[in-house]
């Protein structure tokens, strides 16, 4: 795991600027740093290294191919690099390797097979910058699902890229303003969906995409080399033909293979264990393939409504892991909150970011790599919302869409309906034209009604363009919508940024290419029956952990933020950020709306998640103002 950065056509102060970019992402790679520049400094590459595979200088970056044609900076891991290495040697494409790193295998494979063919062979998580010294082409590549971040864009007319959006803010000529057109999307989701970012002219490279740029480095060409949507369509068209038990056996085989590959490292490896189905499955399959006790880590809270630490301890004892746990308090949360703007670089408001950071910090005291159980819900139909959307749509679909649309418009504008939040929500959802549209509206309705941002214009994004009815079952369509937006732009961002803030590498075995593609072939009845989901995944887990040990309500990985915000300390912090005069002076949010939702929470107990979204945005904006002032009075 590392951090990469670079820019083109910016020879003025290039040494100072690339070093500042490297320093900004020091936490992503505290073990070493490197810089490379073309002879005319037209292309400059920077790298920070967290040594995981081949700890010697032979693994240092930027790295050249043996011929010197290609220069590469690389963040992530190629899990099947040993097989790719053997292929190169067997075909005599390479006579010998200098070291044992996956980076060297990657760059030599590009030399032998070209970029597109190499990436087709690679399984892993990665953000890659590759410069072809012969043609002058710069290529950026992001992994299939979006585990590793890769931002790009233009600063003062010069092309830039980095693993951390904060790297752009340290550049001498950074003046990119806030892009207020993304705020409507932010207040819907609590994050900014790709390809957008908080700054104008700065973007996220979408998962499974490749960006190519030729001199004079002004017109990037972006193409997709893989997409989860195509994988879902293909899987649905070619469903698994065996029994549910046979599906579980095949899933177990694929997960074991992925986990075995992802346990390989030249540094200590462990795993997060939250007591849920997903992380328990990963830890169980790790321990089943390990000669040593697997290191497992969890955090707990005194509030029993949020605490799963005792369950995690029981599972760890059953599996025989070496288990470590940490109990957190409101004081622990308060200590993390001021770091959120720095950790994420742009507004990001999934409140589980706090416990994720704390468990990552504890885990890093013992290991350098941790496996995670993320993606089980999105691939195996685990969320309760998947059932509720189907149930609601089942009641609505008998009424023609034209009638429902008219009724929705009339009811939403009714003053009596507006006074009742539940009735207003029902009226809003009545206008859905499909289960996929219903899911989109269910996410957007509260933020759309509130209109927190003053800017009314917004951008289209993947949910708006989703082809309704593309997959057979509504649950599959909704899972795909989550895999295209929520998972890469929320879950994976949260895990990557919080873990890398403490220099911990995280790996997600369920996002292995073969596992993902197989998951889309599994019939829905093997995943879900009634309101119970993840059936086939549970079939795998119950070989190692008794069903009765796991048969309990899911609590999730969250914190009691609604209680903590009422307590001394956090309440004062919140009210200082939501101060009416401050918000009016900033001129970005609607002070009347912000004041009303906060008072409604404090006085009447009506919690809206947009309160936390607003607090995180205001904290980020305050941090941005301080940095702008320090940089010479730049305006936010």
Image: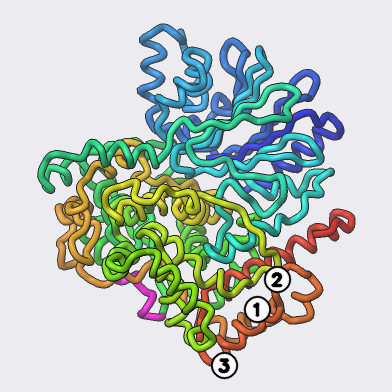
Q: Which image quadrant is residue 381 in?
A: bottom left
Q: Residue at x 72, y 49 (%)?
A: 200
Q: Which residue is mark 3?
A: 603
Secondary structure beneath label 3: helix
Q: Which image quadrant for residue 597?
A: bottom right
- Magenta segment, which residues? 303-313
Q: Is residue 248 visible?
A: yes
To which residue does mark 2 refer?
Answer: 589
- Position of residue 238 in the picture relative to residue 261 (left or right): left
The residue wearing badge 1 is 594
Percent coordinates x, y for residue 623 in the rendering: 73, 63
Callout 1–callout 2 Cβ contact below 8 Å: yes
Taking the magenta stretch, the answer to whether it contains residue 306 is yes
Please identify the residue farthest to the bottom as the structure is shown: 603
Between residue 300 and residue 587, name the one nearer to us: 587
Distance Cα–Cα, label 2 vs label 3: 22 Å
């Amino acid at each position: 795991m590392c951090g990469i950065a670079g820019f083109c056509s910016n020879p003025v102060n290039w040494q100072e600027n690339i070093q500042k970019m490297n320093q900004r992402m020091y936490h992503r790679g505290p073990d070493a740093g490197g810089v490379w520049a073309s002879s005319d400094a037209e292309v400059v590459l920077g790298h920070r290294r967290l040594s995981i595979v081949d700890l010697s200088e032979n693994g240092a970056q930027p790295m050249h191919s043996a011929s010197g044609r290609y220069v590469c900076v690389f963040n992530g891991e190629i899990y099947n690099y040993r097989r790719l290495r053997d292929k190169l040697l067997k075909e005599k494409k390479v006579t010998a390797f200098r070291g044992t790193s996956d980076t060297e295998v990657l760059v030599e494979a590009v030399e032998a097979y070209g970029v597109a063919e190499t990436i087709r062979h690679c399984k892993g998580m990665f953000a890659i910058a590759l410069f072809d010294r012969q043609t002058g082409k710069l290529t950026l590549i992001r992994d299939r699902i979006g585990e590793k971040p890769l931002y790009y864009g233009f600063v003062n007319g010069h092309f830039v890229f980095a693993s951390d959006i904060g790297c752009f803010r340290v550049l001498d000529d950074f003046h990119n303003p806030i892009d207020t057109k993304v705020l409507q999307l932010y207040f819907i989701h609590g994050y900014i969906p790709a390809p957008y970012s908080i700054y104008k002219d700065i973007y996220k490279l979408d998962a499974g995409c490749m960006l190519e740029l030729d001199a004079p480095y002004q017109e990037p060409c972006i193409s997709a080399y893989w997409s989860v949507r195509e994988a879902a369509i293909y899987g649905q068209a070619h469903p698994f033909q065996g029994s549910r038990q046979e599906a579980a056996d095949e899933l177990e085989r694929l997960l074991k293979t992925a986990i075995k590959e992802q346990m390989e490292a030249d540094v200590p490896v462990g795993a997060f264990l939250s007591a849920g189905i997903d992380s328990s499955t990963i830890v169980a399959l790790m321990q089943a393939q390990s000669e040593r006790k697997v290191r497992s880590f969890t955090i707990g809270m005194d509030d029993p409504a949020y605490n799963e630490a005792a369950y995690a301890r029981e599972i760890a004892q059953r599996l025989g892991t070496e288990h470590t746990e940490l109990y957190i308090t409101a004081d622990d949360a308060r200590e993390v909150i001021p770091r959120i703007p720095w950790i994420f670089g742009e507004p990001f408001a999934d409140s589980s970011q706090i416990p994720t950071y704390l468990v990552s910090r504890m885990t890093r005291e013992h290991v350098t790599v941790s496996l995670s159980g993320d993606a089980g819900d999105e691939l195996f139909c685990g969320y309760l919302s998947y059932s509720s959307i189907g149930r609601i749509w089942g009641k609505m679909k008998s009424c023609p869409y034209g009638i429902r649309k008219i009724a929705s418009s009339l009811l939403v504008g009714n003053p009596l309906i507006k006074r009742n939040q539940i009735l207003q929500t029902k009226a809003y959802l009545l206008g859905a034209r499909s289960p996929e549209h219903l899911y989109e509206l269910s996410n957007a309705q509260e933020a759309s009604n509130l209109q927190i941002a003053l800017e009314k214009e917004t951008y289209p994004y993947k949910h708006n363009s989703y082809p309704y009815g593309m997959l057979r079952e509504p649950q599959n369509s909704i899972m795909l919508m989550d895999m295209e937006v929520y998972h890469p732009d929320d879950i994976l961002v949260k895990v990557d940024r919080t873990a890398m803030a403490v220099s911990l590498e995280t790996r997600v075995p369920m996002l292995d290419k073969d596992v993902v593609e197989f998951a889309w072939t599994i019939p829905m009845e093997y995943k879900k029956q009634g309101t119970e989901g993840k059936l086939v995944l549970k079939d795998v887990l119950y070989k190692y952990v008794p069903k009765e040990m796991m048969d309990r309500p899911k609590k999730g990985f969250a914190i009691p933020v609604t209680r903590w915000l009422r307590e001394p300390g956090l309440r004062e912090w919140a009210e200082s950020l939501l101060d009416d005069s401050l918000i009016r002076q900033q001129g970005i949010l609607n002070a009347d709306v912000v004041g009303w939702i906060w008072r409604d929470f404090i006085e009447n107990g009506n919690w809206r998640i947009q309160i936390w979204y607003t607090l995180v945005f205001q904290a980020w904006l305050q941090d941005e103002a301080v940095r702008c002032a320090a940089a010479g009075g730049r305006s936010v």
